Image: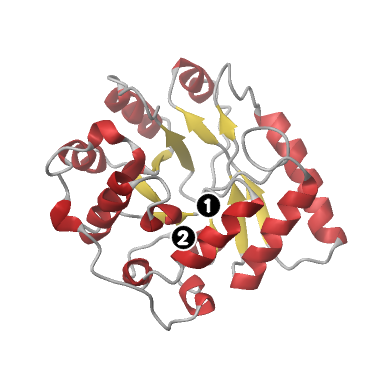
Amino acid sequence: MFDSLKSIFSKSEISDSVLVENIKVDMHSHLLPGIDDGVKSIEESIEIIRHFIGLGYKKIITTPHIMKGTYDNTSEIIKNKLQIVRQEIQSQNLDIEIEASAEYYLDTHFLDLLFNGDILSFGKENYVLVEFSYLQKQNDYQNIFMNISQTDYQPILAHPERYAYFYDKNLSQLKQIKEQGVLFQLNLFSILGVYGKGAKMVAEHLVKENMIDFVGTDIHKPKHIAYLDDCLKDKYLQKLLQSGNLKNKSLLS
């Protein structure tokens, strides 16, 4: 379906540190130990954080899942875990800032949190990172996005390239979501094909159409560090990082 979108770029000589200068902030990861499908220990957290520092990142906004019945996290649980990680970063004299928000699964539980004002947003614009099911399209998502905007939050859709039910010829459904004012966050690893050929091609198309507002690693485990090193050498991603379209650096303030 997306044969015309095959990547035409290969590796480049541009250093990782130069590329990270155009990101500075990773705003999607799972680095609070033991509360979702991310890292299991503080040691794993620090191993990944050290790698971020080595690449030149200045800030991490980590985003554990909140998904009723699967990951029953609360704002309090997340804040408490964040404090543990911050203390370890401080004790090891690591030069990086870390905050925590959440990756909210769009369901009725999310709406309850939204209407009760119990949302961990980030940035001056009150960004809130949300995700869909990978398996089944949610029919009322347009109303949910409207509710988010009406409560003075700015929705960011996590990894839009990974929802296969949006793979139509012109990605018209994703364009409709974008036109509704929803920002898009691309998973860096999608560029490598880590999530499959379809996600890679859609990611490239979204880049081509200037539809990407943020990039994030969505890193879960230390073994994913190699993906981060590899994707930063991908020339197609370099094109995105040097485009001036990304908002990641605005999260430093």
- The front one of 216 and 225 is 225
Q: Amino acid at mark 2?
A: Asn
Q: Please give the residue where the numbered disc 2 appears in the rendered image.
A: 248
Residue 188 position by quadrant: bottom left
Q: Position of residue 109 (x, y in %)?
A: 51, 17
Residue count near mark 1 (Cα–Cα under 10 Å), binned few <14, some 14–19, many ≥20: many
Q: Are marks 1 and 2 in contact (CB under 8 Å)?
A: yes
Q: Amino acid at mark 1?
A: Met
Name which residue lies at 45% across and 64% down.
Answer: 231
Q: How does the figure colour the protein chain or chains?
A: secondary structure
Residue count near mark 2 (Cα–Cα under 10 Å), binned few <14, some 14–19, many ≥20: many
Q: Please give the residue where the numbered disc 1 appears in the rendered image.
A: 27
- The front one of 176 and 159 is 159
Q: Position of residue 105 (x, y in %)?
A: 47, 28
Q: Position of residue 130 (x, y in %)?
A: 44, 35
Instruction: Tell me how far mark 1 sits from mark 2, CA to CA.
Output: 7 Å
242 horizontally vs 49: left or right:
left
Q: Classify mark 1: helix, strand or loop.
A: loop
